[in-house]
Amino acid sequence: MTSRSETILATVLLLLAGAVYLPSVGGDFVYDDHRFVQLNPAVREGAALESYFLEPETQTADRSFHGLYRPLRTLSYRAVHLLSPDAPAQRVASLLLHLLNGWLVWRLLRFVLGPRQGGGALLGALAFVLHPLATESVAFISSRGDLLAMTGMLGAVLLYLRPGRPARLASLAIFLLALCSKESAVVLPGLLVLVDGFIEGPGRIRGRWRAYAQYGQVLLLWLAMRYLALGSGAFGQDGGLGLPGGELLASVFSSGVYYTAATTLPWWLTFELDLAASAGLATSGFFLAAALLFVAGRLRALARPATLAILWFPVALIPVTLFQFVFPLKVEIANRFAYPALVSFAMLLAFAATRRKTAFALAMIVLAAFVPLTVARAGVFKDERSLWTDVLETQPGHSRALYGLGVADLKAGEFSLARERLRRAALANPRNPRLAVHLATACRELASRQARSSPEYRRYVLETQSAYQAAVNLWAGGFPGGREHFRSVALEAAWWSMLAGDSNCVIADVEILLEADGALRPQEATFRHIEEISRFLDAILRSDLSEFLALEVEALRKGVKR
């Protein structure tokens, strides 16, 4: 049993270790936080409880859930929003969850190492809390699902180890909650097999098949819930990376190399890394996996905690490696994906610290080295500009980073810099209509600041028209995200085509506008643009379209009055 004083000491030290994340606590919403949290009506205004589980649209503001089923994550955002709608409240909630996970890791390490190795267990838990690789899960609000799933997995393991039916039922219930937080929790049955093998070896595993079957039944229940909510999209994120089998296998083994390196040498981390998978890297990943299995087998009789730690690592990564063939993801590499695997590092460090005094001293040095690294990484997530600047320092042509910085420049009124960055982002990723709209906004603002007789004005008008036209064509071609802006952007495209003197594009955009679903924004600029486009259409003898636009204006004005 753990003494009360030891529990208090561990809790206090873990809370103090959490101070390394303070640079991020006062930060703003960044990147996906806007659609998952800040602008999400289900978070801001709330919804019926069953809606979070049955309507996947509640997960995002733009309804583009792409195969995600994480209702408990969204509910956690809503719960925190009721206390405070600001980003710091969400960041504090994530930090507290991480510290809770560190405390649960400490309890697990106490079991693995034995009650007489409290110092080693505490070092391992502190390594988990302080590890720079955990920063993305803690400081990136959108990664709340990783934290909640980890809480559920660790809690389910600890309850599984306790005798009695109530503990088993509680473990099963927590497992279901973990699955509803993020699909990474599917590996729990595999982790339980590892823990049973650690306790008594293969004999215990063979005798526990009924217990494993109960967790399998929970998995089936969760899959049924996913299918009920997502339908045919329940098994993956829109085809994932879209790679053929051989390239996907190379990507899986290459990502294994990355996660191993990021866990053991975490001083070069960055956000949203674009991994260039290669045959050489994939081969290294294959041999690395084989080496881990070989070493784990050799250590089974001599150092069972080390065997458990080594095997925990690849099993915890199965959802983002081997399961890519079943539940394909749209992101190849993300530091937050490795969050469950950090328990492996904590176990190895804790075990090594209990073997020799020199190892204990080295473990302390490792923890001390983690502190400045994690403080620096936490500061990266403070706002959009710091986040994407960090990415561009290591990946100068990263399209998402250029996009993110371009939007930040727009908000700051730095339109020339925004145009340059957004143009580079659009060249790297021409399939994003929202990026094109932001580029059009930057060019539009620059045009408004030029004399109408100047060549610069003409250039910016043409660039604005081209960017709006690109967005309209993508949405007309079926691009799903952001379609609530489709009609308004089609109107802008028609108006700027009119300024550019391109009558064919004006006609095409107006026809798209009249046929598209959705609503225009009832504001004076909308009425003014429609009236000017109508006069242009009359001048080029397309009064049939101008008549339809007149009906559109009439309906829109009635809508305003209501």
Image (cartoon, helix red, strand yellow):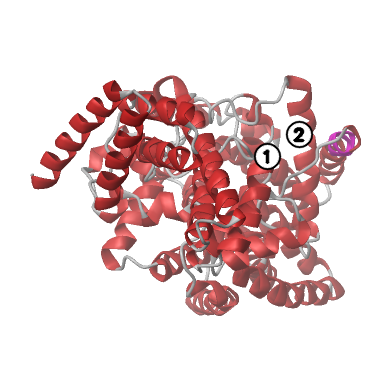
**Number of numbered discs on residues:** 2
In the image, residue 244 sits, relative to residue 557, either above or below, namely above
Q: Label 2 crowding class (10 Å Cα cut-off): few <14, some 14-19, many 20+?
A: many
Judged left or right of residue 37, residue 364 is: right
Judged left or right of residue 121, residue 228 is: left
Looking at this rendering, what residue extends furthest in the left direction?
Answer: 562
Please tell me whether mark 2 sits on a helix, a strand or a loop.
helix
In the image, residue 344 sits, relative to residue 318, either above or below, namely below
Mark 1 = which residue? 332
Q: Quadrant of the C terminus?
A: top left
* Image location of residue 102, percent across then percent down: 56, 64
For the point 57% across and 73% down, the residue is 21
Name the amino acid, label 2.
Ser
Please tell me whether mark 1 sits on a helix, a strand or a loop.
loop
Does residue 3 appear in the picture of this structure? no
Does residue 496 appear in the picture of this structure? yes
Cα–Cα gap, marks 2 and 1: 8 Å
In the image, residue 409 sits, relative to residue 527, either above or below, namely below
* Image location of residue 56, percent across then percent down: 36, 35
- State the residue in front, 421 or 79: 421
Verify whether residue 496 appears in magenta: no
Judged left or right of residue 226, residue 241 is: right
* Image location of residue 381, percent across then percent down: 57, 66
- State the residue in front, 414 or 407: 414
Query: Which residues, given as a range, are shown in magenta?
Result: 281-287
State yes or no: discs 2 and 1 in contact (Cβ < 8 Å). yes
* Image location of residue 354, percent across then percent down: 76, 67
Name the amino acid, label 1.
Glu
Mark 2 = which residue? 251
